[in-house]
Amino acid sequence: MQGKIIRGIAGFYYVHNGSHIYECKAKGIFRKDGIKPLVGDNVVLEVLDEEKLLGNIISILPRSSEIIRPAVANVDQAMIIFAIQKPDPNFNLLDRFIIYMEQKNLPCIICFNKQDIASEEEKAAIASAYEGSGCQVLFASALEEDGLEEIRKVLKGKTTTVAGPSGVGKSSLINKLQTGTYMETGSISVKIERGKHTTRHSEMIAIDEDTYILDTPGFSSLQLFDVEKNTLKDYYREFDDYSDQCRFLDCIHQNEPDCGVKRAVDEGRISKIRYENYLLLLDELANRRQY
């Protein structure tokens, strides 16, 4: 029997086969081969007890994508959720998310929740800052159920990993997106007490036919791996239009004279928020290389 892992916790994996959810253990061969099943994996399982919906995962089918933070597989895109206020968005962390998802070749959507408590000027400033990032920017309010239809449109027919820091209303927004029951989850809740307010484990949720979201734990930091100081600029797409105006071909837009990117920042054509984050990350990468 084939199915998809929708949740993993404490060595148990919950596999949905289209009609039921089976509680499974992974065969020891996975540990021997250094393979860890991930939420989103398509797997083959053997049923041990049909009445109790128990089974074993015996193989993992090839993955189309894999990311480690959050640890999920077979996703089509990422949606990063921040609050526009309360808490104020950490744009440095947001840029880290964008870079990480681009490293994984995943299209990225940025969604700012709690737009009901923000002014139009604040929304416009944020939209302007990230319009050149290569990401689609959306605004929503889980409290007022505003902006949900636009989110549903970009999620439809795809598997989307949803991530972001704690306290931004991520779980509230996800709950509002569920308009029907597309996946029976009673067999999970019998065995696991799910927290009411905090997601502690990655979990796949069906919000429409052929439309899944992977809800992941909130976190407040993200290290940049496999990024070199001289390649960081490649992840800031808005730099591309001005880098050919730099005097030096290998310009990293930091201290070099006659830099087209720095000139664009001074003239307001590149967001200062994004550029200042870029400089902070450059320093971090430079310091990391010293140790």
Image: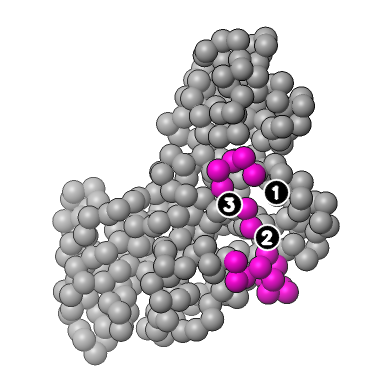
Q: What amino acid type should be assigned to the residue bearing mark 2?
A: Phe
Q: Is disc 1 placed on a helix, strand or loop?
A: helix
Residue at figure coordinates x 45%, y 55% from the top left: 77
Residue 87 part of the magenta-drawn span: no
Q: Secondary structure at mark 3?
A: strand
Query: Could you tell me the amino acid type at mark 1?
Result: Ala
Is 148 in front, or is 230?
A: 148
The disc placed on residue 136 is: 3
> How far from the left and from the top, in percent, is residue 120?
81, 56
Residue 66 appears left or right of 251: left
Q: Using the image, determine if residue 144 lies above or below residue 84.
A: below
**Magenta segment:** 131-150
Q: In the rendered structure, which disc, 3 or 1, sits on the residue that comes first in sequence?
A: 1
Label 2: which residue?
Answer: 139
The CA distance from mark 3 to mark 1 is 9 Å
- Amino acid at circle 3: Gln
> Which quadrant does the N terminus fall into?
bottom left
Q: Residues within 10 Å of mark 2 (few under 14, many from 20)?
A: many
User: SS at mark 2?
Assistant: strand
- Residue 148 image offset from top left, x and y in percent: 62, 70
Tag of residue 127: 1
